Image: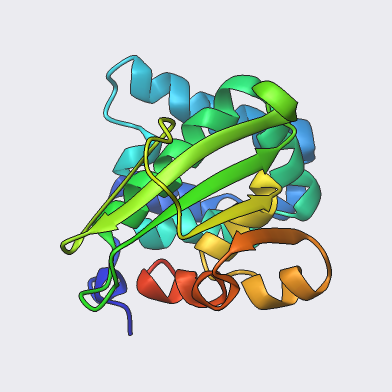
């Protein structure tokens, strides 16, 4: 069992989020739900995506349809909010045995040069940090849709299977990237 999933979720916000039947929401409604959670967080209400337990955050990603995730990742602001949230959680859920490494991410459909959003993840001395500055030589560069990244990062899709299907492109250490999700305990609850 994952260490973040050992204690029961007692947060009222977690209970609220888990009570929503995401299958009943169309893509626009799903985006508005996440947008509302983000807006409430920015307003300082105490309801914020970052306040959700990791298991509930993963639960939402797991139950969202591909169309809902695609719509979410097509939203200019929420794309950044949700990707930043995943990267922040990766930093908090790094496994003890993770090797030092640098990974560059290229998310398709972005607004930067070449139509990508770019991030860098650095694992060093038992810490994981991510950001938009790519100032180190990577062990690998991964090109992936942001929706597929959400699924892989939360344990809801297999990176090797997506690679075989041509949905993930890797420049550099392919075996390392195939095992990269295993360095975090952000898996499906």
Instruction: Give whichever of 87, 60 is nearer the camera.
Output: 87
Q: Which residue, as the protein is rendered here, is positioned at the far left?
A: 125
Location of residue 139 with respect to 89 vertically, above or below: below
Location of residue 158 with respect to 125 vertically, above or below: below
Q: Which residue, as the protein is rendered here, is positioned at the far bottom?
A: 1
Q: Which residue, as the protein is rendered here, is positioned at the far top?
A: 43
How many numbered discs?
Answer: 0
* Quarter residue 112 falls in: top right
Residue positioned 67% across, 36% down in the render: 73
Residue positioned 29% across, 73% down in the render: 98
The answer to whether residue 129 of the structure is visible from this angle is yes
Residue positioned 75% across, 36% down in the render: 71
Residue positioned 74% across, 69% down in the render: 162
Q: Give the x, y percent position of residue 18.
A: 49, 55
Task: Indicate the quadrant containing the C terminus: top left, top right, bottom left or bottom right.
Answer: bottom left
The answer to whether residue 189 of the structure is visible from this angle is no
Instruction: Give whichever of 65, 133 is nearer the camera.
Output: 133
Task: Indicate the quadrant containing the N terminus: top left, top right, bottom left or bottom right.
Answer: bottom left
Q: Give the x, y percent position of residue 131.
A: 38, 36
Q: Give the x, y percent position of residue 148.
A: 68, 56
Instruction: Give whichever of 11, 72 is nearer the camera.
Output: 72
Q: Give the x, y percent position of residue 125.
A: 16, 62
* Quarter residue 101 falls in: bottom left
Q: How is the image coloured?
A: rainbow
* Quarter residue 161 falls in: bottom right
Instruction: Give whichever of 24, 98 is nearer the camera.
Output: 98
Relative to 159, 11 lies left or right: left
Relative to 185, 72 lies left or right: right
């Amino acid at each position: 069992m994952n260490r973040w999933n050992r204690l029961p979720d007692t947060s009222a916000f977690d209970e609220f989020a888990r009570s929503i039947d995401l299958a009943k929401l169309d893509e626009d409604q799903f985006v508005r739900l996440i947008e509302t959670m983000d807006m409430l967080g920015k307003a300082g209400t105490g309801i914020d995506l970052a306040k959700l337990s990791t298991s509930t955050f993963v639960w939402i990603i797991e139950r969202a349809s591909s169309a809902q995730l695609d719509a979410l990742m097509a939203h200019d602001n929420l794309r950044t909010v949700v990707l930043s949230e995943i990267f922040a959680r990766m930093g908090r859920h790094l496994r003890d045995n993770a090797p030092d490494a640098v990974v560059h991410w290229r998310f398709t459909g972005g607004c930067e040069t070449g139509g990508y959003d770019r991030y860098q993840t650095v694992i060093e001395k038992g810490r994981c940090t991510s950001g938009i500055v790519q100032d180190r030589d990577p062990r690998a560069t991964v090109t992936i849709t942001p929706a597929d990244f959400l699924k892989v990062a939360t344990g809801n899709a297999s990176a090797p299977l997506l690679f075989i299907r041509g949905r993930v492109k890797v420049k550099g250490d392919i075996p390392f990237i195939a095992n990269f999700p295993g360095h975090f305990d952000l898996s499906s609850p």
